[in-house]
Amino acid sequence: MDDQSRMLQTLAGVNLAGHTVQGGMALPPPHGHEGADGDGRKQDIGDILHQIMTITDQSLDEAQAKKHALNCHRMKPALFSVLCEIKEKTGLSIRGAQEEDPPDPQLMRLDNMLLAEGVSGPEKGGGSAAAAAAAAASGGSSDNSIEHSDYRAKLTQIRQIYHTELEKYEQACNEFTTHVMNLLREQSRTRPISPKEIERMVGIIHRKFSSIQMQLKQSTCEAVMILRSRFLDARRKRRNFSKQATEILNEYFYSHLSNPYPSEEAKEELAKKCSITVSQGSAAGQCFPTSPKSRPCSSGSWKVSNWFGNKRIRYKKNIGKFQEEANLYAAKTAVTAAHAVAAAVQNNQTNSPTTPNSGSSGSFNLPNSGDMFMNMQSLNGDSYQGSQVGANVQSQVDSLRHVINQTGGYSDALGGGSLYSPHNLNANGGWQDATTPSSVTSPTEGPGSVHSDTSN
DNA sequence: TGTAATGATTGGGG
DNA sequence: CCCCAATCATTACA
């Protein structure tokens, strides 16, 4: 290849620079002569030109013969030098030489992705990163390894196909380049070809082939994505959350019953607490590519959203059914809250006389007293009309005690449906806005919104 | 094996 | 974009 191009360069270079062609047979330029001889030469040139123009219409053998004849024609060197002159004047040989194509961003994307998926990277990786991440997703369940190896096998297959195809393309590209260079070399006998032209031609060929390669890469990427989505689809098989996770979620739900809409941060935190990530416990940080709605990546917060969505709707639909659960979690929260209150009281007594009434302020981790009251209302049917905003520590302690007492014998109180009309739900069936933005959960409330005291 | 529970998806609405 | 409501699909359990 190198030798070839060098050879071509010298060939073309000599042709261009010196007008010295094929054994120094350069003829004087045609325009230098006139008279009787002139007409004959004109005739000659016209003849040659005609032959050149029609050469492509002929059969290969015929053309070869013609070519040979042309090459041996006495006018050929003269024509050649004329062509050289023309070329020099028009600057054709330089044109386009400086075309430097910048790296295609799309190609880079594809390359990166193939690398990330382990298709184009080092052999050993083999997509294990992606597969392992996805595998870790299902928390090491038994069927996991099967899926995992299946995924790996398929990925290896894709990888192999990709590499053989790539090799094929490269080989074809090289072959074609050589072929074109041979052609050019051949042509350089009849017309001046500069090294830059050859370079340019090679560049064009490479660009063409790399665009084909890009298609290959693209389809490989697609294949990987399909495989991946199927793989994830398979592990999207529903798995119930762990008991602990459900507990945490329930605690949050029932303690925020007046406004059970956790903020994005709260969801994230809940997901973290519950070890819920995509695919339940994965650290993969992947999105579901097949998910119709683009879910947030990198955590299972959207699973938390699902859970809350389901919970809200099911709670609303059948509050009675959930009452037991509500009581249970109310009591649970109450206990933890009581601890907090106790601590708060102590804190209050010993530290500062200021009233800690802002729910989420300072060290008073009183989880959503407002919600607690709501719960209590639904517990026993009577209503605590006391100001939720101004609830002081003592009243909370009382209320909590009340709740705890109630939870002992909830079952009788839970019969009638109307009795349990949700105080938190408005006439339209929706959750009414929190009446006390400061005490009731607001989406933007502080870090205390997710109970740090929930058992986990 | 039937059924309830439950996580996920979908389509529509604001 | 988030939520609701309905529904699907899978899992848990009697």
Image: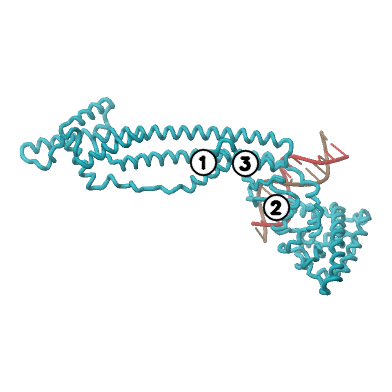
Chain colours: A cyan, B brown, C red
Tell me which residue sits at (81%, 70%) in the image. Answer: A356
- Please state the horizontal and vertical placement of residue A262, each as a whole percent of the image: 73, 58
Asked if the residues shown at circle 3 and circle 1 are in contact, with their CB atoms under 8 angstroms apart, the answer is: no
- The quadrant the N terminus of chain A occupies is top left
The residue at which mark 2 appears reads as A301
Do tag 3 and tag 2 residues touch (Cβ < 8 Å)? no
User: Looking at the picture, how far across and down is residue A213, in whole percent?
Assistant: 47, 39
Residues marked 2 and 1, same chain: yes
Residue tagged by mark 3? Answer: A129
Q: Is residue A252 left or right of residue A22?
A: right
- Whether residue A402 can be seen here: yes
Chain letter of mark 2 equals: A
Q: Chain of mark 1?
A: A
Are the residues at dot 2 and dot 1 in contact (C-beta closer than 8 Å)?
no
Q: Nearer the viewer, residue A81 or A233?
A: A81
Residue type, label 2: Ser
Residue A254: percent from the left, percent from the top? 81, 57
Residue identified by numbered label 1: A218
Q: In the rendered structure, which disc, 3 or 1, sits on the residue that comes first in sequence?
A: 3
The residue that appears at 80% across and 63% down in the rendered structure is A365
> Which comes before the other along the chain, label 3 or label 2?
3
